[in-house]
Amino acid sequence: MDPLIARLGLALAIGLLVGLERGWRERDAPDRSRTAGIRTFGLSGLLGGIFAALANALGAVSVLVGGFIAFAAIFAWYKAREAAHDEDFSVTSVIAGLGVFALGALAVAGDYRAASAGGAALAAVLASREILHGLLKRLTWIELRSALILAVMTAIILPLLPNRTMDPWDGFNPWEVWFLTVLMASISFAGYVAVRVLGNTRGLLVSSLAGSLVSSTAVTLALARNGSSASNPLPLAGAASLAAMVSVLRVCAVVLIIEPGVFASVGIPVIAAALVFAAGGAFLLARNSGDRESGTIARNPFELGPLLLFALLFAFVATASAGLAAQFGGRGLLASSMLAGMFDVDVSVLSALRLVKHAVPVETVGQAVLAALAANAIGRVSLAVFAGPIKFWLPLVSTTVIALIAGYGAMVLPPNF
């Protein structure tokens, strides 16, 4: 079959797809009361393809440009008459019509795969009006600001950073540091959005699990402070245990995303510890005697200040870890991982994982990840002892000790995972 016929068919299909969505929305309108429906949009796409074919045949791009301008003028004029009659100020259909014409031309004169994807995306955006409008009504300024910051971090800052190491130990790579910072911010933002969409963030359980996607240490500290005024702090301790479980599983997910080979060394110990935290948290939550006061943790998806601090700390720890590993081998890496893990487990784990690319054995990196998790657990319960009552921190400490024992026991098992 002639490729031109196939491409013209694609141009027609793009218009029909968009016209199907536009026509469905106006299916109850009387005949001839609307400017464009499924047939008009289908013909618009085909018309764009025809003008592109004529431009190619004549070797004159001005044919396509003139056709687009004429189409835009006629289509907009008819839509303006309809809008005046209906008192409708929406310009969506006009933009959709111009997009269909342009995509039809692209299907013939350019990359037909990009045109096909663009047509599907255009129809999907048009069909998502209710979802998008509902999202805007529920969206807070903090959430919008976080999304914009994440977009700037990813699309503007990241491509500008040099992708090479800049220290004698090959530890500090600006692009890699910022990429992993963006990754952690994206995980936190995705978890925040999931909780906003799927659950009530005011409950003890949901708020604790949501907060632990950002920082289980902060969740534990907040719950410990609220435990001082709660008549029954056991459910709060249970929520802190579940927050620790989420933190451990989050690290597991980061390992799988960045260095899947390391998961073979850490999988069994991490899962064993997570199961203990889950069992302990469920048991303590079941001890709720009716005290429903929950220390809900209202957290932003992420804030720019802590995020920049994370990047700086990660850059420092990455450089220090590379230097210690080059100087002292595995023992230096374990020491730096434990020290960094006391403050931020994400920084420590990411710093250790990136050393796989620098010929550090996978087993050594896995031990560093486990050391960071253990140090973070110890730091977390230390804050709980400092800030909370004994009825809060004693069950949490007991659960953490059992989880550490279970993880260590799983680690010394034959590594046949």
Image (cartoon, rainbow, N blue to C red):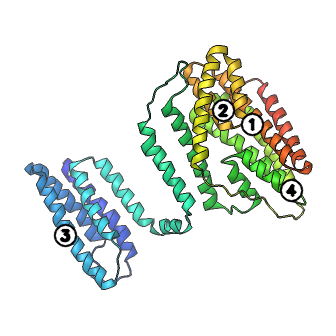
Measuring 29% from the left and 83% from the top, which residue is drawn there?
84
Q: CA distance from mark 1 to mark 4?
A: 26 Å
**Circle 3 residue:** 73
Foreground disc of the pair 3, 1: 1
Foreground disc of the pair 2, 4: 2
Disc nearer the start of the sequence (3/1): 3
Q: Position of residue 26 (x, y in %)?
A: 37, 77
Residue 286's label in the rendered image is 4
Q: Are marks 1 and 2 in contact (CB under 8 Å)?
A: yes
Image quadrant occupied by the C terminus: top right
Q: CA distance from mark 2 to mark 3?
A: 60 Å
Can residue 183 be seen here?
yes
Q: Are marks 2 and 4 in contact (CB under 8 Å)?
A: no
Foreground disc of the pair 2, 3: 2
Under mark 1, the amino acid is Asn
Measuring 55% from the left and 24% from the top, which residue is drawn there?
171
Q: Position of residue 108 (x, y in %)?
A: 22, 51
**Circle 1 residue:** 376
Disc nearer the start of the sequence (1/4): 4
Helix, strand or loop at mark 1:
helix
Q: CA distance from mark 2 to mark 4?
A: 34 Å
